[in-house]
C-alpha cells in the first residue's frame, strides 16, 4: 500500500511558531506582532489547510486506476 505524506494543521502551526520565534529573537518582529499573528494563524490554518491540500491533491495526483481486466 502506498503511503501518502500527511500534512496536519498542528504540524504547520508548529513550523510557523518556530519561524515566528526565530523572527522575534532576531528583532524582525515584536513579541506583540508575533502573538497577534499566532492567534490569527491558529484560527485560519485549520480552516484553510484542508482546502489547499484538497486542491493540490485534485490538481496533481492522478486518480487510482483500476487493475486491468484478465
Image (spheres, rainbow, N blue to C red):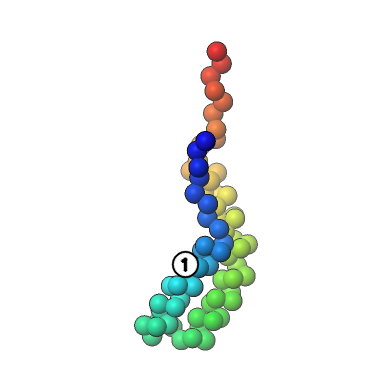
Residue farthest toward the top in the current orientation of the protein:
70
35 is higher (above) or lower (below) than 6: below
The percent position of residue 54, horizontal first and vertical second, equals 57, 49
Instruction: Choose top left, top right, bottom left or bottom right for residue 18.
Output: bottom left
Q: Residue at x 43, y 72 (%)?
A: 19
42 is higher (above) or lower (below) than 64: below
61 is higher (above) or lower (below) than 35: above
Q: Residue at x 58, y 74 (%)?
A: 40
Label 1, residues with CA under 10 Å away: few <14, some 14-19, many ≥20:
few
Which residue is disc 1 drawn over? Answer: 15
Instruction: Choose top left, top right, bottom left or bottom right for residue 64.
Output: top right
The percent position of residue 48, horizontal first and vertical second, equals 59, 61
Q: Quadrant of the C terminus?
A: top right
Residue farthest toward the front in the current orientation of the protein:
1
Name the one closer to the observer, 4 or 41. Answer: 4
Note whether residue 37 is visible: yes
Does residue 20 appear left or right of residue 35 in this picture?
left
The percent position of residue 42, horizontal first and vertical second, equals 59, 71
Badge 1 element: helix
The percent position of residue 60, horizontal first and vertical second, equals 48, 43
Q: Residue at x 46, y 86 (%)?
A: 30
Does residue 16 appear left or right of residue 41 in this picture?
left
Name the one closer to the observer, 4 or 37. Answer: 4
Note whether residue 59 is visible: no
Q: How many numbered marks are there?
A: 1
Amino acid at each position: 500500500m502506498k503511503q501518502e505524506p500527511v500534512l496536519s494543521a498542528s504540524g504547520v502551526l508548529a513550523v510557523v511558531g518556530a519561524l515566528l520565534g526565530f523572527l522575534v529573537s532576531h528583532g524582525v518582529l515584536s513579541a506583540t506582532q508575533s502573538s497577534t499573528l499566532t492567534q490569527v494563524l491558529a484560527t485560519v490554518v485549520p480552516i484553510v489547510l484542508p482546502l489547499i491540500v484538497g486542491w493540490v491533491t485534485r490538481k496533481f495526483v492522478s486518480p487510482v486506476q483500476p487493475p486491468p481486466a484478465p
